[in-house]
Image (tube, helix red, strand yellow):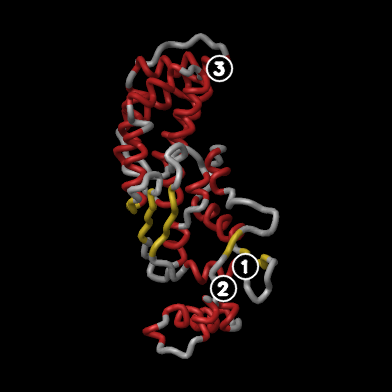
Amino acid sequence: GIKLAAEADEPLEMNFVRKHAMEQAEELNISLREAATRVFSNAAGSYSANVGLAIENGSNIDEKQLQEQFTSRKGFALNSDNPGKLNEASDLFKSALSRVDVTFQNLDSSEISLTDVSHYFDSDPTKVVESLRKDGKKPGAYIADTTTANAQVRSLGAQIRLDSRTKILNPKFYQAALKCGYEGVREISKRLRYTMGWSTTAGAVDNFVYEDANETYITDADIRKQMLDKNPDALRDMVQTFLEANSKGYWNTSEENVQRLKDVYQECEDRIEGVSFMEVA
């Protein structure tokens, strides 16, 4: 259907598929039908952009590297003129992305949301599009929440705020998680890492999310001690996430908070190594 639209003899101001396909055909020196390709994915047998994996594992890779990884792994074209095959077409993929105004994902499970797993931000191209657009404009990013019969479309930022307030910043969530001991602390730490994933791929996390999370889990000595006693490795990972978010400019906070994080990091190291330590004030 897209290729037929591109070939339709219509004025360009009435047919943007044709307009963009013609521009891409000239830009890349390819046929109009090839330029009209609009379905891209991984190579056969491959899955995901591995952006989520890099962020989830704490790989301190810069955004440009992750964006290149996204376009190279997702840049295989599904072409109706060559059915059943996925051909490498990263240049065409980048050309198509450079014309995008809006990014969109569907949220269809109330059990697994945007900050529960890395899958959602792994597939998010918001900053990729921004870097490829000639005008450098950030596209609008939206989420369709179809978890109930009353489906709603929210901005990506609004959905992340909702997720944060109902989970990582919600006393009912973290108090229940802490009761689960070792695994509960790990889940809290992972959720902050997944939240930072959205800063990396879309710049969609408000500063207050990090600030309030730091106040909840680090500044509060009682909760911090519970996490340290139950799972010092996970608390250390959480501190690393906070420090990384601050160093990359995702979170602006006080020097006092940064220093406290460094002190807590050392405290975690001491606990893990079995070294005698002094409690952080």
As drawn, the residue found furthest toward the front would be 149
Q: Which of pointers 3 and 2 lies earlier in the amino acid sequence? A: 2
Question: Mark 1 = which residue?
Answer: 78
- Of residues 50 and 178, the one nearer the viewer is 178
Q: CA distance from mark 1 to mark 3?
A: 49 Å
Image check: 246 left or right of 47?
left
Q: Which of pointers 1 and 3 lies earlier in the amino acid sequence? A: 1
Name which residue type carries label 2.
Answer: Thr
Residue occupying image coordinates x 40% and y 12%: 279
Image position of 136 with respect to 202: above or below: below
Residue 37's mark? 2
Residue mark closest to the camera, 3 vs 2: 2
- Of residues 138 and 280, the one nearer the viewer is 138
Name which residue type carries label 3.
Answer: Ile
Task: Identify the image quadrant of residue 130.
Answer: bottom left
Residue 2's mark? none
How packed is label 1: few (under 14 Cα within 10 Å), some, or many (20 or more)? many
Residue 272's mark? 3
Name which residue type carries label 1.
Answer: Leu
How packed is label 2: few (under 14 Cα within 10 Å), some, or many (20 or more)? many
Residue occupying image coordinates x 58% and y 55%: 69
Q: Which of pointers 2 and 1 lies earlier in the amino acid sequence? A: 2
Q: Pointer 2 and pointer 1: residues touching (CB < 8 Å)? A: yes
* Helix, strand or loop at mark 3: helix
Place of residue 4 in the rendered image (x, y in percent of width and height, measured from the top left): 53, 81
In the rendered image, the quadrant that contains the C terminus is: top left
Residue occupying image coordinates x 43% and y 26%: 262
* Helix, strand or loop at mark 2: loop
* Helix, strand or loop at mark 1: strand
Image position of 106 with respect to 110: above or below: below
Place of residue 76 in the rendered image (x, y in percent of width and height, measured from the top left): 63, 64
Task: Identify the image quadrant of residue 59.
Answer: top right
